[in-house]
């Protein structure tokens, strides 16, 4: 059995990489899958999230990949990787080598959009990406809909050569979940019904052949 590998990556700090990574990990854990969450960031936000996680929730194995070599336990079905900020060049290439699918969160701000232009240009030149071995997709994150800057972000993302797969709203639900070491899928459905609806397109892409090597 091969391990499904998913990387959440954007060198721009503060764009919500950890929120996406832990949410994806909890999604698959709640489907009964064997999940490893590898934290490549020295800030260790994913590992702190796991420390807050109660044993009553489905288990997720954490690995501090920023300080030790990544050894995936036998039988792991999903490896979710939380990338650090400020990675460039060879560091990006090495991270991408590990992944079948890369999810890139982008915030609706002029600074983040400009940073995304440069980063996406660079990552499209990485060998595995240019050969369609590793697939990319973009998520608009922490969005307040019906704002001018969000519409500008939408236009930018739709012009890209990679899929724009989801829009996730700016909500306190993600903060509440992070405090408890849980994902959006583990909160009361009545509180997160809108968020769960937004996640459907993201998880649908991850579970489809479109997110895997041609």
Image (cartoon, rainbow, N blue to C red):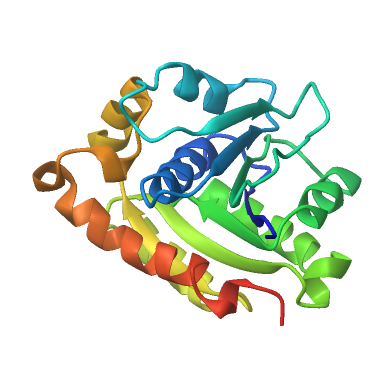
Q: Residue 152, located in which quarter of the rendered image? A: bottom left
The relative height of residue 81 versus residue 100 in the rendered view (above or below) is: above
* Quadrant position of residue 91: top right
Which of 115/197 is in front? 197
The number of discs equals: 0
Q: Residue at x 83, y 77 (%)?
A: 131
Left or right: 164, with 187 as reference point: right
Picture coordinates of residue 67, whole percent (x, y)? 79, 21
**Left or right relative to 96: residue 210:** left
Q: Quadrant of residue 148?
A: bottom left
> Residue 146's spot in the image, x, y percent?
23, 61
Q: Nearer the viewer, residue 123 or 78?
A: 78
The residue that appears at 81% across and 75% down in the rendered structure is 130
Can see residue 42? yes
In the shown orientation, is residue 89 left or right of residue 137?
Answer: right
Position of residue 155 relative to residue 122, above or below, is below
Q: Quadrant of the C terminus?
A: bottom right
Q: Locate residue 6, reporting x and y percent.
A: 62, 54
Name the outermost residue toward the left: 190
Q: Quadrant of the N terminus?
A: bottom right
Q: Is residue 146 visible from the viewing direction of this image?
A: no
Q: Position of residue 66 (x, y in %)?
A: 76, 26
Q: Residue at x 78, y 48 (%)?
A: 95
**Furthest residue toward bottom:** 214
């Amino acid at each position: 059995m091969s391990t499904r590998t998913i990387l959440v990556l954007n060198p721009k700090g503060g764009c919500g990489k950890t929120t996406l990574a832990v949410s994806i990990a909890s999604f698959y854990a709640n489907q009964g899958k064997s999940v490893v969450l590898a934290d490549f960031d020295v800030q260790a936000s994913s590992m702190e999230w796991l420390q807050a996680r109660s044993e009553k929730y489905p288990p997720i194995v954490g690995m501090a990949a920023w300080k030790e070599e990544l050894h995936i336990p036998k039988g792991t079905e999903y490896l979710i990787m939380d990338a650090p900020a400020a990675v460039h060049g060879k560091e990006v290439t090495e991270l991408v080598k590990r992944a079948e699918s890369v999810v890139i969160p982008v915030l609706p701000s002029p600074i983040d959009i400009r940073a995304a232009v440069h980063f996406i240009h660079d990552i499209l030149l990485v060998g595995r990406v240019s050969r369609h071995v590793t697939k990319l997709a973009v998520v608009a994150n922490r969005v307040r809909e019906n704002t001018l800057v969000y519409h500008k972000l939408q236009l930018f993302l739709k012009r890209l050569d990679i899929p724009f797969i989801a829009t996730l709203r700016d909500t306190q639900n993600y903060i509440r979940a992070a405090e408890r070491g849980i994902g959006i899928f583990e909160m009361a459905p009545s509180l997160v019904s809108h968020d769960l609806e937004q996640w459907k397109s993201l998880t649908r892409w991850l579970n489809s052949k479109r997110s895997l090597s041609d």
